């Protein structure tokens, strides 16, 4: 029996080794998130030995919850490679029209803060972010002047207030680099690009050169790879490390996670928001984006749970916090920030719909009392009054003395102000044209007679940048009125420059061809274009081709 026992022990040992091999064979797991081209992933996979590096693609095509799915696979990543275009703050995306995969930074924060993937990223040593500006250190927000004014009103010396404002900007700037450090907490090495990154094929070539010259020894080591940085030196590659609990701004990450952690109930988040509102309003302002985004997700009051209703009631009854918040909002340098803060105040129960309307009217009256009304102000007022609820406001502090003020009144329903604003479209002042153009995006021309008058006035303008802008404003309209189109066709041969002619063609190319005398117009375009050299890619040539078809 002894020989048989020895053979049995041998077989058992052999089986144990065979079972252990799949686990021991791979020293490191490389997870890839490929939302655009696979060039970078393929370069890593080509040079990293298959017996030591296991590759796992986390994206499941056609499945929107692919990241959540990956969290439950049991995979633990040592290296993470993300490939995709990056918009500088919100998401990684693809330039392929048929692709629907993307990776929102907010989703990455949710996973990081919620411990939703306790294994997936728990042992990361390196992250590679192949996208433009993924490690751009430039702050996306800064403490504005109202922050300093608020601190001074609260009794702080101006020098101290300015120092604290700089500290708030440093901690809450939310540069791309800061957000990646927040997401990949404690990861030793995060590689990315501080500005423009190479496209996928070019990045793959550079990676191949690196591997051919240096091998794979430093990949996954968790130590700064100077040779790799040198290889990408002409492409602004940068490296940083994930945020740690010992850093001065670690408390900001904990606050951010209160908004992102999906394990928290709405009532718990609202209790945190109430605690946040007890702090200096200067700090609350720095969380406005997250506060606004979360408040927008709350269900309407009739669908709220009793816990959520109680939490909102506690905030709504906090009069001191309300007064400090509204004081700060009314002092905001940017009117759009004021609007956003006031809308949050309404959702928190601090303003009724009637109160909010009074706040809008107060802000608009203050705006009209100033001489620096901008196109942005016009766009804001037209947006606020999209439903006509603010129609009829007549400010005692403003007269219709310029196009900008007229446009604000036009947004508030004044017919006289509308006529003055449309006249601004044909002004010699580019600023007036820009104001009128902004107004028309919100309040387009729908009356045929009004459109004919405007086109006739544009045709009388002397060739200039202002005339080009006026024509560009008309290009949004798919004109079908024969009289209007005939006026533009007659303008083409007498236009002062090729730029104006291109602008005319930009209007006509979007028009209804059935009402155009196409053969005559083609001859006009060919015989009277300012440049006799046909450019196959310009709008005049494109219009000629369409008319001939």
Image (spheres, grey):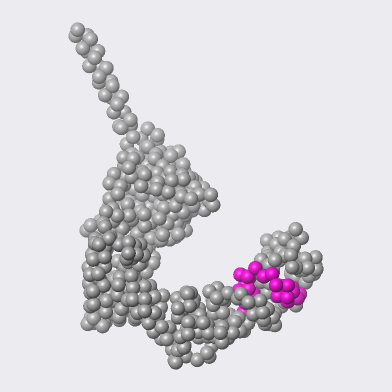
Residue 39 seen anywhere in this rendered image of the structure: yes
Residue shown at the point (36%, 47%) measured from the top left: 68
Q: Residue 512 or 227: which is nearer the viewer?
A: 512
Residue shown at the point (28%, 21%) measured from the top left: 15
Above or below residue 110? Residue 214 is above
Judged by its main secondary structure, the magenta piece is helix
**What is the quadrant of residue 492 in the picture?**
bottom right
Q: In the visual, does 45 lie left or right of 173?
A: right
What number of labels is visible?
Answer: 0
Estimate the x, y position of residue 348 in percent, counting from the top left. 30, 70
Q: Residue 396 or 205: which is nearer the viewer?
A: 396
Q: Which residues are magenta?
A: 464-493
Above or below residue 91? Residue 540 is below
Residue shown at the point (40%, 44%) measured from the top left: 58
Residue 407 seen anywhere in this rendered image of the structure: no
Estimate the x, y position of residue 379 in percent, counting from the top left. 49, 76
Q: In the visual, does 303 lie left or right of 418?
A: left
Q: Residue 463 or 345: which is nearer the viewer?
A: 345
* Image quadrant containing the C terminus: bottom right
Estimate the x, y position of residue 243 in percent, counting from the top left. 28, 57
**What is the quadrant of residue 546 in the picture?**
bottom right
Residue shown at the point (22%, 70%) measured from the top left: 314
Residue 491 belongs to the span the image colors magenta: yes
Residue 543 belongs to the span the image colors magenta: no
């Amino acid at each position: 029996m002894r020989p048989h026992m020895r053979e049995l022990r041998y077989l058992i040992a052999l089986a144990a080794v065979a079972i252990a091999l799949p686990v021991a064979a791979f020293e490191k797991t490389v997870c890839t998130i490929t939302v655009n081209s696979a060039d970078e992933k393929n370069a890593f996979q080509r040079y990293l030995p298959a017996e030591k590096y296991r590759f796992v693609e986390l994206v499941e095509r056609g499945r929107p919850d692919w990241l959540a799915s990956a969290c439950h696979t049991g995979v633990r990543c040592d290296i993470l490679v993300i490939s995709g275009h990056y918009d500088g703050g919100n998401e990684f995306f693809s330039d392929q029209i048929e692709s629907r995969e993307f990776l929102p930074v907010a989703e990455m924060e949710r996973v990081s803060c919620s411990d939703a993937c306790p294994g997936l990223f728990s042992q990361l040593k390196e992250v590679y972010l192949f996208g433009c500006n993924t490690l751009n250190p430039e702050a996306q927000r800064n403490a504005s002047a109202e922050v300093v004014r608020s601190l001074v009103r609260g009794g702080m010396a101006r020098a101290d207030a300015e120092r604290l404002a700089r500290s708030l900007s440093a901690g809450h700037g939310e540069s791309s680099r800061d957000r990646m450090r927040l997401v990949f907490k404690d990861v030793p090495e995060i590689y990315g690009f501080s500005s423009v990154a190479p496209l996928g094929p070019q990045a793959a070539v550079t990676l191949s050169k690196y591997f051919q010259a240096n091998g794979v020894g430093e990949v996954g080591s968790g130590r700064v790879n100077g040779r790799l940085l040198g290889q990408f030196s002409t492409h602004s590659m940068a490296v940083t490390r994930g945020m740690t609990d010992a850093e001065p701004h670690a408390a900001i990450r904990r606050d951010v996670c209160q908004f992102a952690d999906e394990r928290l109930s709405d009532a718990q988040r609202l209790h945190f928001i109430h605690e946040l509102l007890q702090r200096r309003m200067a700090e609350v302002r720095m969380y406005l984006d997250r506060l606004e985004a979360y408040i927008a997700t709350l269900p309407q009051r009739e669908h709220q749970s009793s816990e959520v209703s109680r939490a909102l009631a506690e905030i709504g009854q906090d009069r001191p916090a309300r007064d400090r918040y509204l004081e700060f909002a009314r002092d905001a340098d940017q009117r759009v920030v004021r609007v956003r803060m006031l809308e949050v105040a309404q959702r928190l129960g601090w303003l009724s719909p009637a109160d909010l309307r009074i706040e809008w009217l107060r802000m608009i009256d203050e705006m009209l009392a100033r001489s620096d009304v901008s196109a942005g102000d016009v766009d804001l007022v037209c947006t606020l009054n999209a439903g006509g609820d603010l129609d009829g406001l007549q400010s005692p502090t403003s007269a219709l003395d310029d196009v900008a003020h007229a446009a604000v009144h036009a947004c508030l329903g004044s017919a006289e102000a509308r006529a003055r604003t449309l006249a601004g479209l044909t002004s010699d002042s580019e600023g007036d044209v820009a104001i009128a153009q902004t107004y028309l995006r919100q309040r387009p021309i729908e009356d045929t007679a009004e459109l004919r008058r405007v086109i006739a006035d544009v045709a009388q303008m002397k060739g200039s940048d202002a005339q080009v802008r006026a024509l560009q404003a008309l290009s949004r309209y798919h004109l079908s009125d024969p009289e209007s189109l005939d006026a533009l066709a007659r303008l083409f041969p007498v236009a002062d420059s090729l730029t104006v002619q291109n602008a005319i063609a930009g209007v006509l190319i979007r028009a209804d061809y059935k009402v155009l005398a196409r053969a005559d117009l083609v001859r006009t375009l060919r015989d009277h274009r300012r440049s006799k050299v046909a450019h196959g890619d310009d709008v005049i040539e494109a219009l000629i081709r369409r008319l001939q078809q």
